[in-house]
Amino acid sequence: MNNQTIAIGVVALVLGLVVGIAGTSSWLAPSKPETGHGHGHEDDHKDEFERGPHGGRMLESDGLELEVTIYESGIPPQFRIYAYEDGKPIALDGNDLTIYLHRLGGRVDEFSFKQEGEYLRGEQVVEEPHSFDVDVMADKGGESYAWHYASYETRVDLSAQAAEQAGIIVQEAGEQRITQTITLRGEIVLNADTVAHIVPRVHGIVRQVNKRLGDHVDADEVMAVLESRELVEAKSDDIAAEQRLELAAANFARAEALKAKGISSEEDFLKAKQQLAEAEIEHRKTEARLHAFGLTQEQVENVSKEPDTQFAIYTLRAPFAGTVIEKHITQGELVDEDSDVYVLADLSTVWVDLTVYQRDASKIRPGQPVTVSFRGEIPDAVGVIDYISPVVDQATRTATARVILDNPDGLLRPGLFVTAELVEHEAAVPVAVTREAIQNIRGWSAVFVRYGNTFEARPLELGHRDSQWVEVLSGLSAGEQYVAKNSFVLKAEIGKSGATHAH
């Protein structure tokens, strides 16, 4: 069963229940004017007034006849009044005719006229809905004429009890805050600033693997242990360089003392000094190599004190706390300096990369608030735009907007698809109505206003909108009451009654 069928069924059920309660009397009755009306369109009911040669309403008093029409073909609706005397067209001064329209809610529209060809043209627009009480005032030859009639459309009379039974909820139009959003789709990805590809700094055999895929590691924790001949050679070279340095330092001290006593020549002194400098350079070079392998200063200083069994041991340590997301290391295998043995990621934060199409690119800026929604039971997260790609992808013709989100519980897993809403515009508007209140009636975007027990469709000019509210630019004033919920019941009754747009 589709949504339309369900909606029709609900209307029928509500109407049936209320009719059953009210007995044979009509609980939803379109308001009836004292006489009929027309716009010149076909009407399902016989006119309750006389029509003139131009299809308008005929008004007659003491030999003066006025044919009242509303012309709206290709132009905003305007009154066109044709005057007759004894059945023959006559000219009537525009200054001698005034029409007053009394609308629901107490508003009165006054119309002045100007002669245009064979008719008098109203100088003001007859705004929709064309539903009003009409007073026509005319002067001719010193005589005054007055007519009154009612012309209603899209009106329904409904008692308070019947409105309650139909579930109709009325609200007062007023100021609301409208938040316009842009919806983007994207994906959670790793925070590239907190991802490390761990490689050993030496060539060697894997003797111990401490961490598996998915394990959490602390900063500086040992992840694997290698045996490396290269490390043995580097440590041996450092010990030898250290010993040569000590010997060179002793020789230099001896040469310096002999020179001071005049026993040694200047040449011997300078040669000892040169040997000391070369030894220092060589020792610094071997220490630097050990530092490049990842040894700390304390470890380098204690190399000569290590037992022979530890000379070949190289420990692979975590550079920061994180989770192992890739593992490419097995005990007993040979690895070298470019082997990507582990990938470690700090998942306490993640990136959300959003796809931005060209139509939205100009609306997005850094710092813009974003609400990110995830599938499943993960609660929404709030962040801001941190980065927007400066170039557009040549293949997809899209840009990327990035949000950084905290992920303390690890629920935001890279690879999950997301939907994000960005606030494009947010402002308070003087008058707004609920989105549910708006109905399409004869091509209008309209709401039903209420005055007493009378409801009438009111066309609106609409502005900004969000998921709940729609701004009203014209057609409804702050403080007026309108049907905010279940207005479709009134629309259905108007359609059922055969109400027409005819004058």
Image (cartoon, helix red, strand yellow):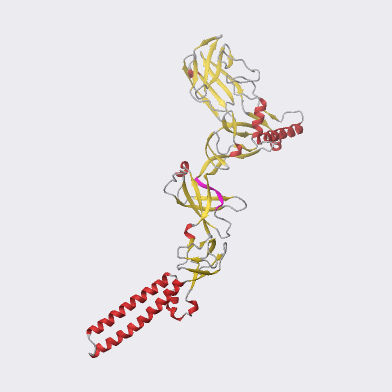
Tally of marks? 0
Kindly identify the residue that appears in the image at 36 percent across and 83 percent down: 246
Q: Which quarter of the rendered picture does the N terminus lie within?
A: top right
Asked if 68 appears above or below 388 in the picture, the reply is above
Closest to the observer, 429 or 363: 363
Kindly identify the residue that appears in the image at 39 percent across and 79 percent down: 240
Q: Is residue 159 visible?
A: no
Could you say where residue 186 lies in the image, as x and y percent from the top left?
A: 52, 48
Q: Which quarter of the rendered picture does the C terminus lie within?
A: top right
Could you say where residue 457 lies in the image, as x and y percent from the top left?
A: 60, 31
Closest to the observer, 210 or 462: 210
Left or right for 285, reference 110: left
Asked if 7 appears above or below 408 in the picture, the reply is above
Asked if 351 appears above or below 274 in the picture, the reply is above
What is the span of residues highlighted in magenta in the rendered image? 415-424
Kindly identify the residue that appears in the image at 48 percent across and 23 percent down: 123
**Magenta highlight on residue 89:** no
**Magenta highlight on residue 419:** yes
Could you say where residue 396 lies in the image, as x and y percent from the top left?
A: 47, 44
Q: Main secondary structure of the magenta part?
A: strand
Kindly identify the residue that appears in the image at 42 percent across and 47 percent down: 391
Q: Is residue 68 visible?
A: yes
